Image: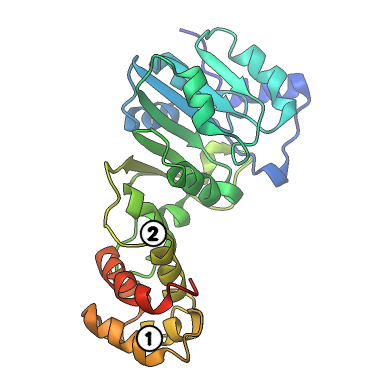
Amino acid sequence: MNKDIATPIRTRAILEKYGFSFKKSLGQNFLIDPNILKRIVDHADITKETGTIEIGPGIGALTEHLARSSKKVVAFEIDQRLLPILKETLSPYDNVEIIHQDVLKANVKAVMDEKFTDISDVMVVANLPYYVTTPIIMKLLEEKLPIRGIVVMLQKEVAERISAQPGTKDYGSLSIAIQYYTTAEVVMTVPKTVFVPQPNVDSAIIRLTRRDKPAVEMKDEAFFFQVIKASFAQRRKTILNNLTNQLPLGKEKKDLIVLALEAAEIDPGRRGETLSIQEYARLSDELLPHFKSEA
């Protein structure tokens, strides 16, 4: 087996050889602990039948572990300076392809159709740059890609928000949006000491398993998310207060909002973070007739 990239000595040698300097704007923090990389791959349940998508491979530390376990790895890398490094570090693996593109601008479905022709089991596994974690996850879910799930390392605090349950301080519109599409669980925490350079915060690995169909049904998905966003606009305010202030013409329609809350069996004095995803589905269906034209 090839020597691991992700040891402090090997990482330092690669960076020095290429004179690589970290760009803060790209959120670059490279892992230097092979055991954690192995555990990330284990949590993704990858087999020799799996196609893996990686985002931000860096110098290939996680990529090589994915290459050893997967049928094929396709990695999106935005930083051109890393392309020659990846070409060298991943040269022992013929099942890896690097795409020099910003994943947020990429047509990921088209890439999957082209690169994974004979693969039906696809996982996204990545050590995500902290500053774009949420947009990347939401893009992958909203585009309803044919993936089994997502296992990513991100800021511990964001992982806690994603997996939070109603009634907790971390629960918010992000929790609901991601749990609408997936079941979410934090599978391990990762100290900041295993990265170079060291980030300011600890990290966590979260596993998102895609649901066969969304967690709840409602009449209008876009309006459902509009209601959720409005309900969390000011966390300390009641749901009635937030909806009245945030929905179009909400102040004029306050009586209708009260009626909709009653019909959905939700106390107007509750706060947004106490409502379950099922309650939000009921509420958005009750509000929809009164707001459809303005939504």
For the residue carrying disc 2, how many other residues have a C-alpha within 10 Å: few (<14), some (14-19), or many (20+)?
some
The residues tagged by marks 1 and 2 sit, at their Cα atoms, a distance apart of: 21 Å
Q: Would residue 6 be visible to someone looking at this image? A: no
Label 1 is placed on what type of residue? Answer: Leu
Q: Nearer the viewer, residue 289 or 91?
A: 289
For the residue carrying disc 1, how many other residues have a C-alpha within 10 Å: few (<14), some (14-19), or many (20+)?
many
* Quadrant housing residue 128: top right
Q: Which mark is residue 264?
A: none
Q: Earlier in the sequence, mark 1 or mark 2?
A: 2
Q: Residue at x 41, y 71 (%)?
A: 227
User: Where does residue 12 sit, x and y in percent of width and height?
Assistant: 66, 25
User: Where does residue 102 sit, x and y in percent of width and height?
Assistant: 64, 36
User: Where does residue 139 sit, x and y in percent of width and height?
Assistant: 51, 45
- The colour mode here is rainbow
| SS category of the residue bearing label 1 | helix
In the shown orientation, is residue 140 left or right of residue 212? right
The nearer-to-camera label among 1 and 2 is 2
Q: Would residue 52 be visible to someone looking at this image? A: yes
| SS category of the residue bearing label 2 | helix
Q: Residue at x 73, y 28 (%)?
A: 80
Seen in the picture, residue 153 relative to 47 is either above or below; the reply is below
In the shown orientation, is residue 114 left or right of residue 280? right
Callout 1–callout 2 Cβ contact below 8 Å: no
Seen in the picture, residue 275 relative to 252 is either above or below; the reply is above
Q: Nearer the viewer, residue 254 or 50?
A: 254
User: Where does residue 122 sit, x and y in percent of width and height?
Assistant: 39, 27
Q: Which mark is residue 221?
A: 2
Tell me the quarter of the image containing the N terminus. top left
Seen in the picture, residue 232 relative to 211 is either above or below; the reply is below
Residue hosting label 1: 240
Label 2 is placed on what type of residue? Answer: Glu
Q: Residue at x 56, y 38 (%)?
A: 195
